[in-house]
Structures are given as structure tokens and as C-alpha cells.
Amino acid sequence: MGRLALFLLTACLSVTTMAADVIKGERKETFGDVTVHYNTFNSTFLTPDIAKAAELNRSKNQGVINVSVLKEGKPQTAQVSGTVKDLTSQSIPLKFKQITETGAVYYIAQFPVDQQEIRTFDIKVQTGDKTNTISFQQELFPGQ
């Protein structure tokens, strides 16, 4: 699983870098001493062995959202839930699973990407008795 954490971190950085011209900044939200990093990418960015280890479906029509929570710069466990909406406001619940490795905690979920379109993500992150919400839009493309 160490390779999975390394890959997801690399994917976060490379997808953020590739989208920097569009996004103009890092994908994170800060709530007091808690920082939530997040990104989305097509599951074809995952190698077959990484997808299998994470129990993810690797397909050109499947996206992945990756969320990590840090408290004072250290990995923090949380309850992560959310939805993704298409342009018709059809909402799909995201089923996050926690991946814990030495020095890292990630929450990942998959969602369908049937065509190029802008999707709206609403993510709730609960740490202790605080719940914070992140909403963002992302243009998605089916993979190759």
C-alpha cells in the first residue's frame, strides 16, 4: 500500500500542476487548523496494480476523487462524504473509502464520466464535532 500512497500523492501533484493554468492555485481549503486537499482525475491515470490494490475500477469512464485531511500539517482521520452533480443537477452520492498507510490517510471515491462536462462536487469533511463543506466545479473528460 505504500506505493498506493506515493502514487496518489504524485497524482495529486501532477493533476494539480496540469490544471494550474485553469485553476490558478492549489486545490485545498483551510478551516482553522484543518486543511483539506482534494483533486479529481480519470481512473486511467492509475496503473492496473495500483487500481487493484485500492479496489478501484480502472476505466476511461470512471473518475476518482482523492481527499486528504491534515491537522497542523499531520494526517488526520475524518468522516468524508459527498455528491457529484451533472449539468442537469442529477446528483450521485460518492462512497468514500479510507486508505491508511504509514504517515498518510486518504479518502477516495469513484464516479462515472460518460462525456465531457462540468460537474459540481459537494464534499463534507467531519473532524471531531466540526463539519466543513467544500464545493467546487471541475471539467471532466472520459479517458483514452
Image (cartoon, rainbow, N blue to C red):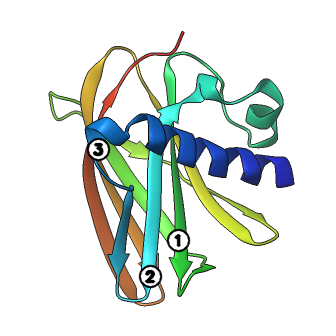
CA–CA distance in space, label 3 to label 1: 20 Å
Helix, strand, or loop for circle 1? strand
- Where residue 36 appears, as percent x and y from the top left, is 44, 68
Q: Earlier in the sequence, mark 3 or mark 1?
A: 3
Q: Amino acid at mark 3?
A: Ile
Amino acid type assigned to the residue bearing label 2 in the image: Val
Give yes or no for contact between labels 2 and 1 (Cβ–Cβ under 8 Å). Answer: yes
Tag 1 or tag 2, which sits nearer the N-term? 2
Q: Classify mark 3: residues with Cα within 10 Å, few (<14), some (14-19) or many (20+).
A: few
**Residue density around tag 2, few if under 14, some if 14–19, many if 20 or more, within 10 Å:** some
Residue in the image at 51% along x and 15% along y: 143
What residue does disc 1 label?
69
Towards the viewer: 87 or 91 = 87
Up/down of 55 relative to 29, above or below: above
Q: Which mark is residue 34?
A: 2
For image coordinates 35% across by 58% down, the residue present is 123
Q: Position of residue 133 (x, y in %)?
A: 29, 67
Which numbered disc, 3 or 2, marks the residue closer to the eye? 3
Q: Is residue 17 left or right of residue 82?
A: right
123 relative to 37 in the view: left or right: left
Residue 107's x, y, as percent?
Answer: 58, 57
Q: Which residue is mark 3?
A: 23
- Dividing the picture into quarters, in which one does residue 5 lie? bottom right
Amino acid type, residue under disc 1 in the picture: Val
89 on left or right of 37: left
Q: Nearer the viewer, residue 11 or 119?
A: 11
Residue 96's disc is none
**Is 81 placed above or below 120 here?**
below
